[in-house]
Image: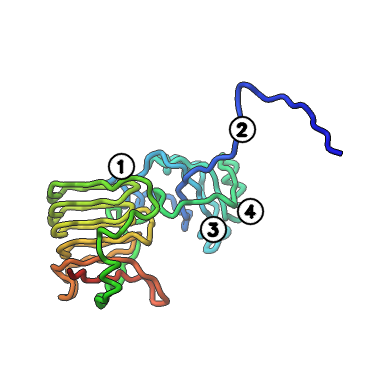
Amino acid sequence: MSVALAGNVPTSFEIKSASLPVVALMLKSPDLGLLEREMATRFGDIPDFFDDDALIIDLAPLKAEQPEAVPDFDALLPLLRQHRLRPLSVRGGSPAQMEAAVKAGLVPTADAVVPRRPPAAETAPPPRPQSEAEVVVAPQSNSAKAEALPVATEPAQTQLTALVIERPVRSGQQVYARGRDLVVMAMVNPGAEVIADGHIHVYAPLRGRAIAGARGDQAARIFALEMNPELISIAGVYRTTDTPLAPEVWGRAAQIHLASDDGGDKLIVTAISG
């Protein structure tokens, strides 16, 4: 037999579950001097790359390589806050590492969900990239043609509309589409830099630097009606083009996407034919 009991409902508050988008910092070294230099190199010229983003410190890489190393969290947390990050929790460390993190005020967690495109970050060159990849020119096929049309590409995992730039991006200028795709309707000149957390579409010559998936979105792509960039990067994997791209794609309409296999990361460049 069921019994219904009367209950009291608070009138001043409610407690409900909530989901919070966060950035994950995969800490690989306890050397905070090195971390500070590399973060300054990578994000120093984009002061608004982070915007008080909530942060999980993931110690799994450090635990795997240096299980006995315990970072100085009292120095680490202010360093991260200088870059407009808000450390909240920690995961993946050894017992000693986790104990030190908790003493510093971090909350241990094992099941936080980190969106693929955070904010974080993950990376790109100035923001500087971490690894250089082989550039592969892919043959054009009918299926590739359909896939390559810029108008058919939807923003990846973002609810924001694309940032549209209608004027040329001149040498020394930098445009960053935070949390969205970037559409440039005019030339990206040599010495200019366009950055997006999602895709980059350039409906004109791309002659500067293009950094897509700046926060780690490996599905991001770069499209241009005339592909002759100084640098291309997707999700931190980059390639300088001091040596021009292959004739099949250099100066032509093309798209670039990231592929990974046993040989490592590759930037795949495919010509777009009309």
Residue that appears at 29% across and 60% down: 152
Q: Amino acid at mark 3?
A: Ala
First along the sequence among labels 4 and 3: 3
Mark 3 neighbour class, 10 Å CA radius: few under 14, some 14 to 19, many 20 or more: some
For residue 95, which numbered disc appears in the image?
4
First along the sequence among labels 4 and 1: 1
State the residue position of label 3: 60
Q: Secondary structure at mark 1?
A: loop
Q: Measure the alpha-carbon separation of dots 2 and 4.
A: 31 Å
Q: Nearer the viewer, mark 3 or mark 2?
A: 2
State the residue position of label 1: 47
Where's the C terminus, which quadrant? Answer: bottom left
Front in this rendered view, residue 130 or 158: 158
Q: Secondary structure at mark 4?
A: helix
State the residue position of label 2: 15
Q: Viewed as shown, does residue 152 lie left or right of 252?
A: right
Mark 1 neighbour class, 10 Å CA radius: few under 14, some 14 to 19, many 20 or more: few
